[in-house]
Amino acid sequence: ARAHNSESQMELLKQASALMSEDRFVLLVVDSATAHFRTDYVGRGELSERQMQLGQFLRQLQRLASEYGLAVILSNQVVANPDGMSFAKDATKPIGGNIIAHASHTRLQLRKGRGENRVCKVYDSPSIPESDATFALGAAGIEDAKD
């Protein structure tokens, strides 16, 4: 299903919960989890409300994961880090701040490598050491990295 704003995103979680009570699901994917919250709550004046609503959304996801034994994958956006040095290797930071960071168990950062290669970096995890894995995207899906 596709949400059109943060309110419909919350409503879809309720609908997902109803479906999960009737059948077995093992994975829930939320693409661009923060996008609607960013567009519905604009500017510093609405930052507090946005973070509060985002926190409620993430708590609902955690409840679903716990109640139904579900894995949840969120994709998110990144922005330039104004605090970072412009010459730093990675001058980006994830959207959502500490609200996303504290609600996530393991955070991965995906970026484009050379050619068809992509790099997946363990950004933060209590159980996986920081590391990188390189892979390629091809006609068959995920493949070994190309040289």
Image (spheres, rainbow, N blue to C red):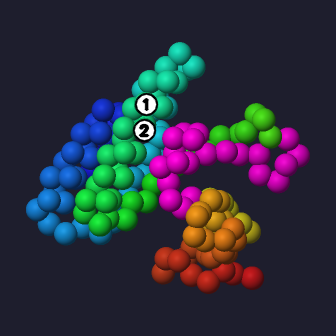
Inspect the magenta stretch and tell me whether residue 104 lies in it: yes
Quadrant housing the C terminus: bottom right
At 36% from the left edge and 34% from the top edge, which residue is drawn? 6
How crowded pointer 2 is (Cα within 10 Å; few <14, some 14-19, many 20+) is rated as some
At 61% from the left edge and 45% from the top edge, which residue is drawn? 94
Q: Secondary structure at mark 1?
A: helix
Check contact, mark 2 vs mark 1: CB within 8 A: yes
**Residue at the extreme right:** 87
At 78% from the left edge and 35% from the top edge, which residue is drawn? 83
**Whole-percent x and y of residue 14?**
21, 45
Where is 147 relative to 20, above or below? below
**Whole-percent x and y of residue 126?**
58, 64
Where is 137 relative to 104, above or below? below
Is residue 117 visible in the rendered structure shown here?
no
Is residue 78 visible in the rendered structure shown here?
yes
Q: Amino acid at mark 2?
A: Gly
Instruction: Look at the image and give the residue range highlighted in magenta.
Output: 85-107
Q: Secondary structure at mark 2?
A: helix
Query: In which quarter of the view is residue 81 placed?
Result: top right
For disc 2, the marked residue is 55
Between the C-alphas of marks 2 and 1, the distance is 5 Å
Which numbered tag is attached to residue 31? none
Q: Amino acid at mark 1?
A: Met
Q: Horizontally, is 66 left or right of 103 in the view?
A: left
At 57% from the left edge and 19% from the top edge, which residue is drawn? 44
How crowded pointer 1 is (Cα within 10 Å; few <14, some 14-19, many 20+) is rated as few
Inspect the magenta stretch and tell me whether residue 139 lies in it: no
Q: Horizontally, is 87 left or right of 57 in the view?
A: right
For disc 1, the marked residue is 52
